[in-house]
Image: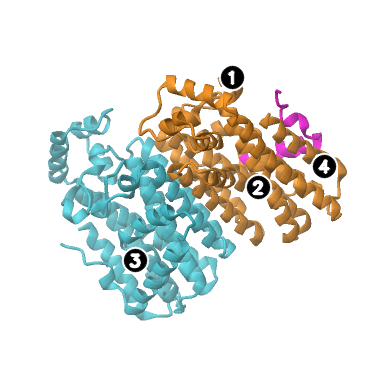
Chain colours: A orange, B cyan
Amino acid sequence: MKAPKLESLLAPEVVSALSRVDAHITNSIASDVPLLFEISNYLNQLGGKRIRPALTILCSRLLGHKEVTEELLNICAGIELIHMATLLHDDIIDKAPTRRGKESAYKKFGETNTLIAGNFLFVKAFGLCAKLDKYIIEETEKACVDLTEGEILEDISNFSIEDSLAICGKKTGALFRLAALSGGFVACRDTTIANKLSVFGQSLGIAFQISDDILDITSTIEQLGKSPCTDLREQKPSIVNCLWLKSGSELASSILNMTVSPSEDLVQRAVSEIKVNGIIEEARSLGNDYVKSAHQVILSLENDFYIKDQETKKLVLSIIDFAASRLN
Amino acid sequence: MKAPKLESLLAPEVVSALSRVDAHITNSIASDVPLLFEISNYLNQLGGKRIRPALTILCSRLLGHKEVTEELLNICAGIELIHMATLLHDDIIDKAPTRRGKESAYKKFGETNTLIAGNFLFVKAFGLCAKLDKYIIEETEKACVDLTEGEILEDISNFSIEDSLAICGKKTGALFRLAALSGGFVACRDTTIANKLSVFGQSLGIAFQISDDILDITSTIEQLGKSPCTDLREQKPSIVNCLWLKSGSELASSILNMTVSPSEDLVQRAVSEIKVNGIIEEARSLGNDYVKSAHQVILSLENDFYIKDQETKKLVLSIIDFAASRLN
């Protein structure tokens, strides 16, 4: 099944709030040195789902806070800038020539400039986040530490399912969690409710990462906007690779433990084996557990009468369905 | 003249405060992922002058604040962590095999791990700085933006003296400025006085960077702890290289505009020409202008009766003398 576009699921008020976030991001990345703005803006213009700011805005509206305040804009732009910084650095780490179907910033501007532009975005995010409530600042620090721990784990992992899920949680779960909890906190100023939304965000993020790991195997280059099977080629501890290795496949053990990148022939043999051996279905089933867990949080908020806006609740449920549809 | 060691200039109370800063840094870089702590701690153990935290403590004591408070420790550790993060990323950018006479973290742990460890240190610094006064947070953001702008300028500069001084100001001046002004602010909570100390720190930082640029040409590998003449080999817009180019040297124009690194023979010819053509003396004279400017700020604080501790004033003046001695 082809997944719908995220934007098509959002209400006009949310789309309009997201364009204000975009403007806030553009304002935040101004610099006396034109190249720093140019690299940052190049990445920004490549687009993206903007799912993190959408989550913040939706979680805020869910609890009855409909105004797009300066605080909310700072949170949304800050989290997106952190995300953008990690994309720039990821492309350096992966030596990725493309990003979202276009030339990557790494390829276009070179390693040094891209590394520094990533740091510039971190600093600008820090400037925005430092204006926020102590609770959000502490959660931002935790999420950013998670990001770095997730990246390192990816580099040194032993391909256990436990490691792979920890990487999903730290690399993708962390910012989804921060986006959801901070949107909720702005609405209610109650860390207990915000912490419930953090479980929602974390679960949704892990489900998204698992679907990314699956799509890396099942999609075409046109659908992905970059070469598929990168996780195989780069011997990454993706959930698909780890489940495949756990299945006892000799080919998996050989490819994932090679000291060089596998040949194209080996990659194609790996894809065939993964597709017929039920690995994708196992990964889907794991992903669906996290979709259910995200869903459960929304039901529990509903039961406790915290949800103040039924229209937004429908949107949040449709985002959860969107995550589920990406798994299939 | 051989410059004295910085530590030998400091009073026992300042040395003792610096060891508390060291402990605070070690506590701050704890991580669930041992490799992140290992890389960070490796760099930390390589030592260094600790001049930034020394400046913060001295500027605080200068205005009568002698207690080593949690706030002061957070500032000192935060600034040093930012500095450490830039060192890790600098070694990636320069592909530097050594740092302070030992194997660099980049060489020992690889590019990916070192890049991520740099980000980890930035995040930990953010966590410490976010606890501070709004004024210090804003100044931290400015200093960090300066750091990234300085790095980019270094990569794209046209070798003008103006660019070179801007790079000195942004790459080294910025954190010296932040260290001095935040120490002063803790003591007096007065941004007008803190801003005076920011001029002191900025000038001292530029003088230090100019002396580093000179030492790169005039020192041995043992004195530097890394290969000398790196600025020539890497065609950097150091103040020495820019003054040399401005002198009209054909060799300078040829070496600094080559699309490849110059041969060892060319580097040695360059060193000889720079040493006999008065370039080092010109750089020293420029550096001394900044030493004088730093000195001037301390005199003006004295005249305005802001200085509350004459012993610390002597130490600050000896740090200025230390900067001057590195130029000669």
Q: Are discs 4 and 3 located on one and the same chain?
A: no
Chain of the residue on which disc 3 is drawn: B
Q: Earlier in the sequence, mark 2 or mark 1?
A: 2
Q: Secondary structure at mark 3?
A: helix
Say which quadrant the C terminus of chain B sits in: bottom left
Is residue A24 a member of the stretch shown in magenta? yes
The percent position of residue B202, horizontal first and vertical second, equals 40, 58
**Location of mark 3 (residue):** B295
Residue type at mark 1: give it: Glu
Between the residue at mark 2 and the residue at mark 1, the CA separation in whole angstroms equals 29 Å
Packing grade of label 4 (10 A; few <14, some 14-19, many >=20) is: many
Packing grade of label 3 (10 A; few <14, some 14-19, many >=20) is: some
Between the residue at mark 4 and the residue at mark 3, the CA separation in whole angstroms equals 62 Å
Q: Secondary structure at mark 2?
A: helix
Name the residue located 45 percent from the left edge and 73 percent from the top edge: B60
Residue type at mark 4: give it: Thr
Is residue B56 a member of the stretch shown in magenta? no
Magenta span: helix, strand or loop, mainly?
helix
Q: Which residues are magenta?
A: A1-25
**Location of mark 4 (residue):** A312
Q: For the residues labelled 2 and 4, say whether their Cβ atoms are less than 8 Å apart.
A: no
**Location of mark 1 (residue):** A222
Q: Where B166 sits versus A43, above or below?
A: below
Name the residue located 71 percent from the left edge and 30 percent from the top edge: A325
Q: Are discs 1 and 4 located on one and the same chain?
A: yes
Q: Are discs 3 and 1 located on one and the same chain?
A: no
Please tell me which residue lies in front, B89 or B318: B89
Residue type at mark 2: give it: Gln
Q: For the residues labelled 1 and 4, say whether their Cβ atoms are less than 8 Å apart.
A: no
